[in-house]
Amino acid sequence: MSQSPIIQFEHVNFQYESQTEPTLKDINFTIQKGEKVLIAGPSGSGKSTLGKILNGMIPEDYPGELSGNITINGQSFNDLDVFKLSFEVGTVLQDPDSQFVGLTVAEDIAFALENDAKPQSEIHQRVSDWAKRLDVAEIISNHPQDISGGQKQRVSLAGVLIGDEPILLLDEPLANLDPAAGEASIELLDHLSHKEDLTVIIIEHRIEEVLHRPIDRLLLIDDGKLIANDTPNQILKSGVLTEVGLREPLYLTALRACGIEVSELPEVDELSKIELPDNGTAVLQWDVEHPIQPNSDGAEPLLEIRNLQFNYPNRSIFNNFNLTINKGEMVAIVGKNGTGKTTLSNLITGFLHPNQGEIKLAGTNLDDLSIKERAEHIGYILQDPNQMISKDMIFDEVALGLRLRGLDEEIIKEKVLSTLKVTGLYPFRNWPIRALSFGQKKRVTIASILVLDPEVMILDEPTAGQDLAHYSEIMDFLEELNRTQQLTTIFITHDMYLMLEYADRAVALSDGEIIADTLPINVLTNDDVVKAASLTHTSLQSLGTLANLENPARFAQGFVDYQKEVRHHE
Ligand SMILES: Nc1ncnc2c1ncn2[C@@H]1O[C@H](COP(=O)(O)OP(=O)(O)OP(=O)(O)O)[C@@H](O)[C@H]1O
Ligand SMILES: Nc1ncnc2c1ncn2[C@@H]1O[C@H](COP(=O)(O)OP(=O)(O)OP(=O)(O)O)[C@@H](O)[C@H]1O
């Protein structure tokens, strides 16, 4: 890494036109050429706002008051417009949908090169190389809307990496990727940054996943201020991440729970660098003292899928698929990007129709119900909140379904406000939705379904883009509904901790087939399933292995359960 600044912020403030307070306050930092920097911070702290300044969307698309000095690759920000900046900064946005310009995946990946008027043969070659590297070659002719969420993320990554800009900015690049693909992307970025002197800036909540490969520096933002700017090692030791409501790597939380003084260990930013005091006796002792509680199962079938067959015009997804979800269960559906999880949800909610087979809810064949009637019973939260939102104001969005049901306005108000409270949105009740961060928008969509009291909730990646505090708030709330009202909950997730923490059953899919249907922990103990479903082991398991425990996976589950217990008592 050469010591020459590529990005410099001096006393930068930014206030959106519609806000009364600045969103970024006196931000100062320098990023050197070739550095790999992680920007983290709670939801709504201003991370994406900072990203939007870097790529010129602020002030171009989001007007407001920007002050201070910014230099990018030796040029003053004042001399750079969005067009000029696009040669300096390649961006992968948080919401890949808003970035697609081509009619096919291939066109989309090629866009930057077409713009540079590169020869067609070179474009072809490079598109096909990048498509292979990001595992999207198979869907290269699809329309960008006709691919899965994780595939969209990979396509936008390919479309940016192909452009060769000196600075790469990625806003939540891991949000929709399956765990194995997430690791692969981080490895790819690491490889590129070593080889090509590329400066990489990653905005992410998922700190542990980003630290899968070394990061030079971590910038921590809280409430619009830069509160830490240091090596990951120093920041992790300080414990500041949990103080601002972010999730530190779980192996560190586990070490602290075992009574090990993390701040006294020399290097903690990789589990493999940690030398456990007394050969891990403290971990062993903790493990013995915390046996896991067996789950009780009550089996009253609620949702029954029988002999389901479904294909898209050019692709078969399900062939004789069978699954029963029982009343009151909290089920996680996990598996590789593009394996059919969202398709399955769309078949249940009626947005798609099976070619063969049937889906029943409490004995009623869902084919007999319209989408609207199904929606009375089954709430569906999409991966991308922007696809669900139709109103300008938060209150109106959450009230929409109740108004369609013709309820009295007083009752609507009461229900909406109480739902806004439990979803943590009450302070924003009079805000326009466009002034919310991505994570906050996601909560609005959850609120707008919860307010309708469904019997089954299907959530596609409920916690993607959420910081730990909001993630726990939403999931604890769903869990409480599940416990007290027996609300059957199915969630699709790529987050292995989420699965361990909240699901009482996990269904792992691969190529449209169920390859495991068992307790979450059993999914992670079976190496064949982990591989086929593109999952990863958790660092808690690796810590268990490091401490020579007999059953490291059981330790992981024990610790996750323990943490939840502790949180409930706080
Ligand atoms: N278009 C906008 N207009 C007005 N205010 C906005 C706009 N976008 C964001 N904000 C304000 O800036 C704050 C920070 O938003 P930003 O998207 O930068 O947060 P973030 O840290 O990236 O959050 P998340 O992790 O949830 O995506 C929001 O809470 C909101 O107050
Ligand atoms: N409208 C469509 N037309 C054709 N193929 C589609 C369409 N929608 C999805 N596909 C393909 O069907 C497969 C399953 O997609 P689906 O969205 O169900 O996957 P997923 O398991 O939810 O993935 P992810 O984890 O990335 O969200 C993918 O290979 C995708 O490219």
Image (spheres, grey):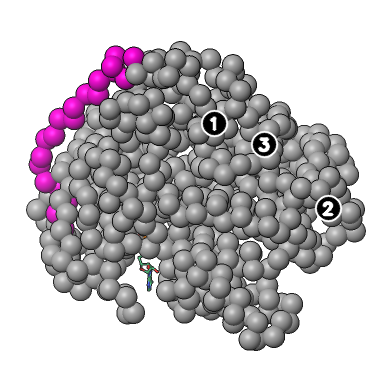
Residue on which the image places disc 1:
273
Residue holding disc 2: 72
Marks 2/3: CA–CA distance? 19 Å
**Which residue is painted at 32% across and 75% down in the image?**
315
Q: Residue at x 35, y 26 (%)?
A: 548
Amino acid type shown at disc 1: Lys
Residue 490 vs residue 551, the one in the foreground: 551
Q: Nearer the viewer, mark 3 or mark 1?
A: 1
On the picture, is 394 further left or further right than 329?
right
Looking at the image, residue 353 lies above or below residue 74: below
- Range of magenta residues: 285-305
Residue 266: % across, % down: 61, 23
Location of mark 3 (residue): 218
| Residue 85 in which image quadrant | bottom right
Residue 192, horizontal then vertical, whole percent = 64, 57
In the image, is 98 to the left or to the right of 85?
Answer: left
Query: What's the amino acid at mark 3?
Result: Leu
* Residue projecting furthest to the front: 279
Say above or below: 141 vs 309: below
